[in-house]
Image (spheres, grey):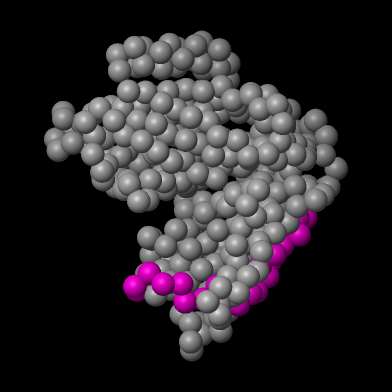
Amino acid sequence: MAAEEEDFASYRSDWESRWGSKGGCGFFKGTILVRFLTHSSLWCFHATQLSSMRFKYSTPKPSLDDGIVANTLQIFSIKLTEIKGGFEWPLPVYGVVVARDHVDHNRNLLFCRSRARTQIVRQNDPFLHLIGPSRAILFNDPVDFEIQLKVKCGAMSGDRELISKTHCYRARHHGVHTVCFENRLCKIELCMELLVATIQATICSIRVVKQGIRQRVERRCRVACSTAPYSRKIINGKTTYVANASSGEVVLLDPGRHATPEGSEGYLDLSRRVVSVEHEEGNLELVVHAYSSSGDITAQGHVSLAPRSFGFSQKKFYVDDAVLEITVDWSFLVANKDTLVRPVGF
């Protein structure tokens, strides 16, 4: 582990010398906390210095000094596939996984947990609960991934390093790819897709407009989306939406979390909100699964939104007899923070 920590320290020193204060990118751990007030539902997340809704009021004409349509990386999952070195399941994990692109070279958080809020990773559910990215990850140049995770072991002095690795990602073709991080203690796989000619969709809110008599979407539900169409199948007499096998899903809310916290006025508490969508060919396809207290799927709902060059889309859809409403902001991408010529239009 000493050699691994030295390699990461060398990587950090190189970043600070190239992109730090002198390079105009600030600190190595530079992120800002962005809060959005969507109607009466307050939601917040860690973000890079650029907003995912930068060009929502822009005219639909991408250029070098305006918003652009470009290749991006869609993050699907980060999976702890193997533990070694005496570790046993379940594993209380904390730390960060981040991406850095050439837009601003700052941290775009994918996973972030403090020691006080460790995630208990289990063998039958080895996926990290992601919170980002907070803006689309541009892929005109190689993207750096960083992973620093620790395991909580009683007192803080007893905590153990799990992994500290970096990876410079260079893909040669579009499609689904997996990056593997491995050392003598664990193996972690990051699954993503390289999408061509995309814009970014920010899911501002999903709100339960009207609870149904048969179905109440308020406690346990799963919300996921994809840019590929879902297949509609009848399984055991029930309609089921199945994601395209050639692509993947972006999980926005997993069924282990409380869907609508107290005081949220029906707004689902999404953990992720930004999705890349192909500008000309793609759609934003979203599926909501409602669960019973025993963990069975009781109902499902589906909605499809065509991408727009800018502005908002809003659409109602059903989960059985419950009515939900989704609001999405569409925005072009930023080519480079140094080319911006207009203020952020929040």
Q: Nearer the viewer, residue 214 or 182?
A: 182
Q: Main secondary structure of the magenta part?
A: strand
Left or right placement of residue 275 versus residue 306 in this view: left
Q: Quadrant of residue 152?
A: top left
Q: Residue at x 48, y 87 (%)?
A: 214
Residue 50, x across and y down, in percent: 60, 37
Whether residue 263 is visible to the viewer of this picture, yes or no, is no
Q: Is residue 284 above or below residue 71?
A: below
Residue 247, x across and y down, in percent: 64, 48
Q: Quadrant of residue 65?
A: top right
Residue 125, x across and y down, in percent: 37, 50
Left or right placement of residue 291 versus residue 201 in this view: left
Count of numbered circles in the view: 0
Residue that lies at the very extreme toward the front in this rendered image: 236
Image quarter hosting the N terminus: top left
Is residue 284 magenta-colored? Answer: no
Residue that lies at the very extreme toward the right in this rendered image: 61
Q: Nearer the viewer, residue 185 or 342?
A: 185
Q: Quadrant of residue 339?
A: top right
Whether residue 73 is visible to the viewer of this picture, yes or no, is yes
Q: Residue at x 72, y 62 (%)?
A: 305
User: Magenta stretch?
Assistant: 293-318
Q: Residue at x 38, y 69 (%)?
A: 295
Q: Residue at x 42, y 62 (%)?
A: 255
Residue that lies at the very extreme toward the bottom in this rendered image: 213
Left or right placement of residue 186 versus residue 321 in this view: left
Q: Is residue 85 above or below residue 230?
A: above
